[in-house]
Amino acid sequence: MANLEQTVSTTRSPADAHDHGVSFADATRVWARVAMLSFGGPAGQIAMMHRIIVEEKRWIGETRFLHALNYCTLLPGPEAQQLAIYIGWLMHKTKGGLVAGILFVLPGVIAIMALSWIYAIFGNVGAVQALFFGLKAAVLAIVLEAVLRIGRRALRNNVMVGLAAAAFIALFFFRAPFPLVILIAAGIGYIGGRAGWAAFKSGNGHDKVGGKQVDDADSALGEGVPAHARPSAGWGFKVAGVGLLLWVVPVLALLAFLGQGNVFTDIAIFFSKMAMVTFGGAYAVLAYVAQQGVEHYGWLKPGEMLDGLGMAETTPGPLIMVTQFVGFMGAYRAPGVLSPVVAGTLGGLLTTWVTFVPCFLWIFLGAPFMETMRSNKALSAALSAITAAVVGVILNLAVWFALHVLFRELHDLSWLGMSLDVPVFNSINIPSLVLTLGALVAVFRFKVGMIPVLLACSTLGVLYGVAMGSI
């Protein structure tokens, strides 16, 4: 502490608050370490980042970390990656945010791409099929656990329970568009917050991250606000212009040269829309991606969506990286004049580009106004309502997955405006049911971690394949 106090003045003025003594090269090495350890979904990634950035390196204090996190929860997109961008930007301006954000996703991009090649080329090999047969059961258990984990945090009263139930009914029974469900929930929460209704008075669930707490004054950045972190109209226009060019121009170029209906154009437009409505984390938006990618575009099959999520669960980076697999498979199956592998690679990279470029835009454009956003009660209430609706969204995802994992045959039932998949009960997949029940017991009864459950189910899937002679 003595050494830190020699380099950090707690009485510094905001103008010189950027002289924090953390070199850009050292920061880059730390962000590379964070990237390689970013397993376990947003909760684990945020806790890991807190341990390294706040407790170990003491770059920023507890209060500033939570302020940044609260802002990121208001945004569409993966909050853990956006938190990395925010802290990197706060420490070393735009280049710091770019390095932190790019490094955070880079290991996942490489890993998912390699797994996508293996899956597409060797997917019909018995060993690969058996491996992903086991992964499906584990992923289903993990998604159900996410429903309960988020539900315990978000459903604080009957109004929030009602929002969750309404979201589930709208999605599962009436196949309402995911963005519409989120927008309606946000509108209800915003109105409730403005009106001061008691049901919408709350925090956003990030009251405490855990571990040792470090005061802002004892951190490298101190309590002051760096000059580059203050709102500036000129900076805002510049960021908006560059960000929109990087995001929108490739989409418009594909639309102009390839036209509507081309797989690359569809990927660019769909995932650009998704980037604007991905509130609530990866599990929530996967229901939307699954609904559109499987049922509307036909890019992949329901079971393959689970395979992709299994890849994302077992590799570093945001869980939303599963979208790269979706884009890969969509382009792989409609390559046009390209070879399938080349088309799939380009489709996967295009998906990643339009998914993550907006994350940098949201942070660089809005972070200077973070304090105002955080203290706005109406916006906090809107976030609470979105989080409650997300419980219903993830439950819909879990039920959708369960139907396609546990039953070999479904038929569509339309009645009184409803449209839903009904299982044919004599088509139940007994081995999959047994493995899923085992995964559920491991997760809920014995509190086994995500990675051990995924590894165990994958191993059992391969052993089952050996026993059945498919390997």
Image (spheres, helix red, strand yellow):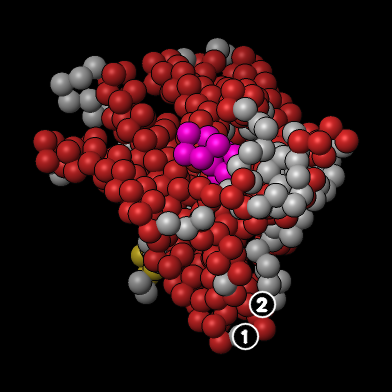
Is residue 218 left or right of 383 when viewed as pictured? right
User: Of the residues shown, which amino acid type is indicated by label 2?
Assistant: Lys
Residue 439's disc number: none
**Dots 2, 1 in contact, CB < 8 A:** yes
**Picture coordinates of residue 444, whole percent (x, y):** 78, 46
Residue under label 2: 201
Considering every residue shown, the one lying at the far right of the view is 2
Residue 78 in picture, x, y percent from top left:
53, 46
**Badge 1: few (under 14), some or many (20 or more) residues near its Cα, within 10 Å?**
few
- Side (left or right) of 183 relative to 460: left
Badge 2: few (under 14), some or many (20 or more) residues near its Cα, within 10 Å? Answer: some
Residue 177 location, x and y as percent? 38, 61
Q: Which mark is residue 197?
A: 1
Q: What span is colored magenta in the figure?
A: 85-96
Left/right of residue 310 with respect to residue 256 in the rendered view: right
Query: Per the image, is 470 magenta?
Result: no
The residue under the point 59% across, 75% down is 377
Q: Say which residue appears at 56% left-offset and 53% top-offset.
A: 72
Q: Is residue 111 above or below residue 356?
A: above
Compared across the picture, whether 306 is left or right of 325 comes to right
Q: Nearer the viewer, residue 396 or 178?
A: 178
User: Which residue is nearer to you in this view: 103 or 460?
Assistant: 103
Kind of residue at badge 1 = Trp
Identified at 55% across, 76% down, the residue is 378
Q: Which secondary structure type mostly characterizes the magenta part of the structure?
A: helix
Locate the C terminus by quadrant.
top right
The image position of residue 415, as x and y in percent, is 37, 70
Q: Distance of mark 2 from mark 1, alpha carbons?
A: 7 Å
